């Protein structure tokens, strides 16, 4: 059974660095074809893809946010992390991690975490 | 970056009514994927590879399209279909979602 769960600080101040963790089970990120992404959604708004990391450690970023994002994974291949630097109010959102359907030609997400809400406020 | 524009933004349909949601891409894409999201919940995969139904999706749903124009259709609206639907594409190492279509029951 595949599950993903996000965790984060809940609230942080503008200009700080946001650190998020995605813990997952039911698959290993060391398995060929596995990719985990971060996606966010401000309240009442659409979804925005942020970053992805694959089984080989290759990283992909949303070009509009690339300078502020760092995605990484742990050595046990059961967690993925996202750091966003210099946050401001516009970064207030629910943050999801999601798995790309592995070893499949097209790119879509077959499993999502429950999301973690992050509020940026002074 | 490919921009996906969904229409309508919101709509209401009566039970039994046919519903069509459109997603237009700013450049041609090979596939379109759709997600259903209900309030307070994570998005669920709904239609993938333009026309394939995800596990558990009722067969009153269908997807079609090519190039820059794609659509999600419900042949006969039911109360449980009330949700927001998002399209999604991946191209040139960049992934984008549509702006969403909120579907309500009349």
Image (cartoon, coloured by chain):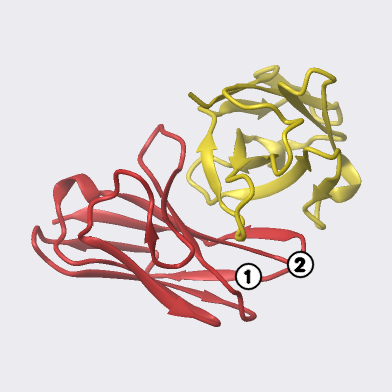
Chain colours: A yellow, B red
* Residue visible at 87% across and 35% down in the picture: A86
Q: In this view of the protein, can residue A54 be seen by the observer?
A: yes
Q: Which residue lies furthest to the left in this view?
A: B16
The answer to whether residue A65 is above or below residue A57 is below
Instruction: Identify the secondary structure beneath mark 2.
Output: loop
Residue B3, label in figure: 1
Return the disc, 2 or 1, that comes first in the chain's sequence.
1
Q: In this view of the protein, can residue A122 be seen by the observer?
A: no
* Residue visible at 77% across and 60% down in the picture: B93
Provide residue A116's location: percent of width, then percent of height: 58, 25
The mark closer to the camera, 2 or 1, is 2
* Residue visible at 44% across and 75% down in the picture: B70
User: In terms of image quadrants, where is residue A52?
Assistant: top right
Left or right: residue A73 versus residue B103 is right
Provide residue A75's location: percent of width, then percent of height: 85, 20
Residue B92, label in figure: 2
* Residue visible at 74% across and 21% down in the picture: A12
User: In terms of image quadrants, where is residue B26?
Assistant: bottom right
Chain of the residue displaying label 2 = B
Chain of the residue displaying label 1 = B
> Neighbour class for label 2 at 10 Å: few (<14), some, many (≥20)?
few
Q: Are marks 2 and 1 on the same chain?
A: yes
> Neighbour class for label 1 at 10 Å: few (<14), some, many (≥20)?
some
């Amino acid at each position: 059974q595949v599950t993903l769960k996000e965790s984060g600080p809940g609230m942080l101040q503008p200009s700080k660095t946001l650190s998020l963790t995605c813990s997952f089970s039911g698959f290993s990120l060391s398995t060929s074809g596995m990719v985990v992404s971060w996606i966010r959604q401000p309240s009442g708004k659409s979804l925005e893809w942020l970053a992805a990391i694959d089984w080989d450690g290759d990283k992909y970023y949303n070009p509009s946010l690339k300078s502020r994002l760092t995605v990484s994974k742990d050595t046990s291949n059961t967690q993925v992390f996202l750091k966003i630097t210099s946050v401001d109010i516009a970064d207030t959102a629910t943050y999801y991690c999601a798995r790309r359907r592995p070893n499949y030609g097209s790119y879509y997400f077959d499993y999502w975490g429950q999301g973690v809400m992050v509020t940026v406020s002074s | 970056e490919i921009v996906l524009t969904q229409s309508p933004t919101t709509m209401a349909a009566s039970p039994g009514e046919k519903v069509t949601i459109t997603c237009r891409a700013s450049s041609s894409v090979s596939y379109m994927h759709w997600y259903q999201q209900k309030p307070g919940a994570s998005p669920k995969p709904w239609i993938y590879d333009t026309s394939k139904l995800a596990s558990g999706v009722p067969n009153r749903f269908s997807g079609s399209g090519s190039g820059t124009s794609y659509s999600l259709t419900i042949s006969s609206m039911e109360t449980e279909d009330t949700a927001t639907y998002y399209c999604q594409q991946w191209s040139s190492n960049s992934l984008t979602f549509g702006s969403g279509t909120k579907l309500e029951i009349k």
